[in-house]
Amino acid sequence: MSNAAAGARGLSVETWRALAQVGQPVPMRFTVTGDSMVPFIRGGRDELKLIPMDRPACVGDIVLFPHGSIPGRYVLHRVWKVEGDLVQTFGDGCMRPDGWMGADRIWGRVVRIRRNNRCLNPEDRRLRIAAALWVRMWRMRRWVLWIFIPERAVAAIGRRLPVK
């Protein structure tokens, strides 16, 4: 997600974060880019509502944090593991989890997903169960994701074909 994808009020992510830190939290709405959260969140189509962290991160939360090596870029992934003050995230459309990070690096969490004029609550029991099942089958994702992201299938097949 880039700064251009900031909330409906035209705030940059940094300004949104600063307001939250001084006790003036503002929900942010944006359309996500990328496919690291497919199939649960679809880049370019789904609008998300994000709030600053108002509680400790829990397994299954969809959270926003700054990219580790690219300033001004942000990552939106699901919390996979929590151990004390450390959190490990894993994008639903990714093949490997992210590295461990301090829970203080997480800036916000998704509280609503808007898809095709329908609002989905990531806290809904059915979505939590579906996400938990998806997380548990992480070793088989590659095959299932081909349905949602055919470009990955083409790229993977291309890598396996012998070059003559």
Image (cartoon, rainbow, N blue to C red):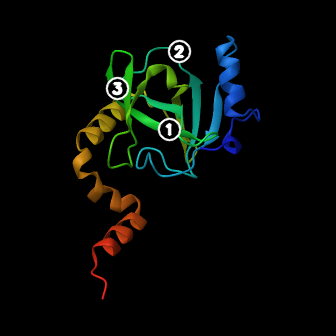
Q: Kindly identify the amino acid type of the residue bearing the numbered disc 3.
A: Val
Q: Residues within 10 Å of mark 3 (few under 14, many from 20)?
A: some
What residue is rendered at 37% in x and 48% in y? 94
4 left or right of 36 in image? right
Q: Secondary structure at mark 2?
A: loop
Q: Is residue 142 above or below residue 28?
A: below
Q: Would you identify the image quadrant in which residue 97 lies?
A: top left
Which mark is on residue 54? 2
Q: Residue at x 53, y 41 (%)?
A: 69
Circle on res. 29: none
Inter-mark Cα distance, 1 to 3: 14 Å
Q: Quadrant of the N terminus?
A: top right
Q: Are marks 2 and 3 in contact (CB under 8 Å)?
A: no
* Of callouts 2 and 3, the N-terminal one: 2
**Residue under pointer 1:** 76
Give how far across and how far down residue 163 sits, in percent: 31, 83
Report which residue position mark 3 lands on: 59
**Which amino acid is tagged 1?**
Leu
**CA–CA distance in space, label 2 to label 1:** 17 Å
| Residue 121 appearing in the image | no
Secondary structure under the numbered disc 1 in the rendered image: strand
Q: Earlier in the sequence, mark 2 or mark 1?
A: 2
Could you tell me which quadrant the C terminus lies in?
bottom left
Pointer 1 or 3: first along the chain = 3
How many residues crowd around disc 2 within 10 Å: few (fewer than 14), some, or many (20 or more)?
few
Badge 3 marks a residue whose secondary structure is loop
Q: Most extreme residue toward the bottom, as rendered?
A: 164
Residue 99 percent across, percent down from the top left: 37, 35
Task: Choose between 133 and 52: the one closer to the eye.
Answer: 52
Percent x, y of residue 42: 49, 50
Image location (x, y in percent) of residue 93: 39, 49
Along the horizontal axis of the image, is 3 left or right of 1?
A: right
